[in-house]
Image (tube, helix red, strand yellow):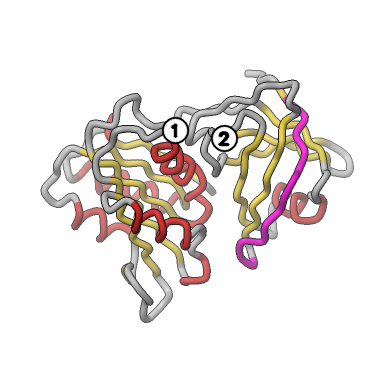
Amino acid sequence: MTYPFYEVEVIKIIDETAMVKRFYFKVSPDEKFEFKAGQFVMLDLPLDSRVITRSYSIASAPTDDTLFEICAALKADGQGTPWLWKNLKVGTKLRCSEAVGKFILPESINHDLCFIATGTGIAPLRSMIMDIYAKKMLHKNIYLIFGNRWAKDILYRTEFEELQVLHPEFKFIPVLSRETSIVGEGRLGYVHQVYQELFANQRKAHFYLCGWSAMVREAQANLKGMGYTKSEIKLELYD
């Protein structure tokens, strides 16, 4: 399948952690770039002898028809992110596909939402959460269970903590697997025990899983074992 491509320009880069960068892109105002929260784009990366295409989820909400953000972790033995790290600067222009993907919010949010992420798998979930509040969508409780190894790896932490203060129905639960203690709210260990406890009563909910494939597959199996159906579980893998 072929997709329309746009020319996009890098307008800002943030070193979020030692291994993660946030890249902000701008589409020409002559072209209307539309996307749904949770979708991804494909970037054409011109290596020395050929062009490779890599997919990246959009981390920002669709509040502007010309701007979007991606959040990428450096994979030293890969081709895509090492090229981005070395070559992307403010002003760099690339070819970018239209937004694609079915990892999106339901049309009506009639039940609790439970977002479960690890690492940069947070990107499309952040887009959805920001979209819900930007558009003032009617919703129930929203749980964000975010697994990382270390506290320093928690992306968008301040943003989610502030959102939790403003909106008590939004519950941000960072989960750390390598720390021996945690400052503030959160859990030690892995994401699985958290959603299993929160939804032990098996009430109606929609689950969105994104991140390391081992986590996503285990969570999918656990949720099915709890009685949740395929239509209630959406997933996207990040490795």
Callout 2–callout 1 Cβ contact below 8 Å:
yes
The amino acid marked with disc number 2 is Phe
- Give the residue at the far front of this rendering: 166
Label 2 SS: strand
The magenta span reads 6-18
> Which SS does the magenta portion mostly show?
strand
Q: For the residue carrying disc 2, how many other residues have a C-alpha within 10 Å: few (<14), some (14-19), or many (20+)?
A: many
Q: Position of residue 101 (x, y in %)?
A: 51, 28
In three-dimensional space, the C-alpha distance between marks 2 and 1, rounded to whole angstroms, equals: 9 Å
* SS at mark 1 in the image: loop
- Coordinates of residue 29 in the picture (x, y in percent): 73, 26
Residue at left 55%, top 44%?
A: 59
Give the residue drawn at x 43%, y 74%: 178
Q: Quadrant of the N terminus?
A: top right
From the viewer's perspective, is 88 left or right of 222? right
| Magenta span includes 130 | no
Mark 1 burial class by Cα count in 10 Å: few <14, some 14-19, many 20+: many
The dot on residue 129 is none
View extreme (left): residue: 201
Count of numbered tags: 2
Please tell me in which quadrant of the rendered image residue 206 appears.
top left
The answer to which quarter of the image holds residue 43 is top right
Instruction: Please say whether residue 12 is one of the residues in the magenta stretch.
Output: yes
Residue type at mark 1 is Phe
Give residue 103's mark.
Answer: 1
The residue that appears at 26% across and 49% down in the rendered structure is 169
* Residue beneath disc 2: 40
Residue occupying the point 25% across, 60% down: 193
Q: Where in the figure is residue 94, as x and y percent of width and height?
A: 78, 36
Residue 57 vs residue 51, the one in the foreground: 57
109 lies above or below 162: above
